[in-house]
Amino acid sequence: MALFLFKRLITLLATLAGTSVVVFAVLEVLPGNAAQVLMGPDASPEAVAALTAKLGLDQPALARYGQWIAGLLTGDMGLSYAYSTPVGELVMQRLTLTVPLALMAMALTVVLALAAGVYAAARHHKAGDVGVMGLTQVGIAIPNFWFAILLILLFAVHLKWFAAGGFPGWEDGVFEGLRALILPALSLAVVQAAILARITRSSVLEVMREDFVRTARAKGASPRRVMWGHVLRNAMIPVITVMGLQFAELLAGTIVVESVFYLPGLGRLIFQSIANRDLIVVRNCVMLLAVMVVVVNFVVDVLYAVIDPRVKASDI
């Protein structure tokens, strides 16, 4: 197990190092000048040059990359060009909304998908199976932003159960904060739950054909015990893979939903920073999202070894 974790950790670090180079290089080749954008089109060349030097944009790219990495390792993300605020403070403020939103959406996704997938597999080729698969096909076809608008029209405009947008802040109470995130989380979860339900159904059906399942049934185990005690655990490997990818996607893909519901999350911060040419914020936010994705994949690999020892043994 120790060797397995060591190899996965080395892979994680190598991936992060390569990602940092790609993120920095891609943003470096973008056209435009952050100092010019901040000063405005009518600013004099001298003023633009002075601000460029103040922001450190006149230094060689390699030197700026080294300073950026050194800052990340020490927890210093630098100062935002547009907000004149430490980037770390901006990111942490937005993460207090984006992370709970992604967690809520993932929880809804898992509950809906596992229930629907297992239900459909247990009623293979019956009306329940056909109905669930039809609903999941519709769920996959619905864009997140369109479903978010439908939720606003139904629950905010007509029923008036929820606010149409905005976020009151956690200082107004956890209940109020979570209540404001229910509709955004549901709009994010629908597509992901539809995809995961179909994968769960396929995986469960494949495991149900295995010899050990027939043996368990022959020994007199109840259908419920066979499904939850034997089938589902062995069917979780591909499901967990997709869960990890979906959670990473939820973290990185909240820009549209946060815009629809006017939520001050990390997605809106990235969007605003791109418009302001605030590259230091964009760079750190993208790198943070990349770190989250890589760490989630690492956790998924570890869960593989816990759920199925054959994965660990074959890797070593």
Image (cartoon, rainbow, N blue to C red):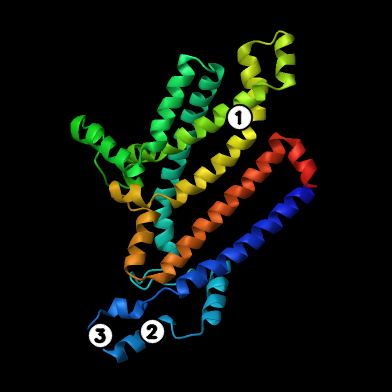
- Most extreme residue toward the top, as rendered? 220
Q: Quarter of the image holding residue 143?
A: top left
Q: Regarding mark 3 in the picture, which secondary structure is present there?
A: loop
Return the x and y of residue 238 as percentages of the image width and height: 61, 36
Query: Tag 2: Cα neighbours inside 10 Å, few (<14), some, or many (≥20)?
Result: some
Q: Which of labels 1 and 2 is toward the front? A: 1
Residue farthest toward the front in the current orientation of the protein: 125
Q: Which residue is mark 3?
A: 43
- Looking at numbered disc 3 in the image, what kind of residue is underneath it? Ala
Q: Which residue is mark 2?
A: 52
Q: Earlier in the sequence, mark 3 or mark 1?
A: 3
Between 70 and 225, the residue placed more toward the observer is 225
Distance CA(mark 1)–CA(mark 2): 56 Å
How far from the left and from the top, in percent, is residue 173?
A: 34, 41
* Rendered residue at 54%/18% (across/down): 124
- Residue 76, can we see it? no
Q: Is residue 123 above or below residue 179?
A: above
Identify residue for label 1: 203
Alpha carbon distance from label 3 to label 1: 61 Å
Disc 1 residue type?
Ser
Q: Which of 299 and 191 lies nearest the eye of the viewer?
A: 191
- Identify which residue is drawn at 38% across, 55% down: 267
Q: Position of residue 8 (x, y in %)?
A: 70, 52
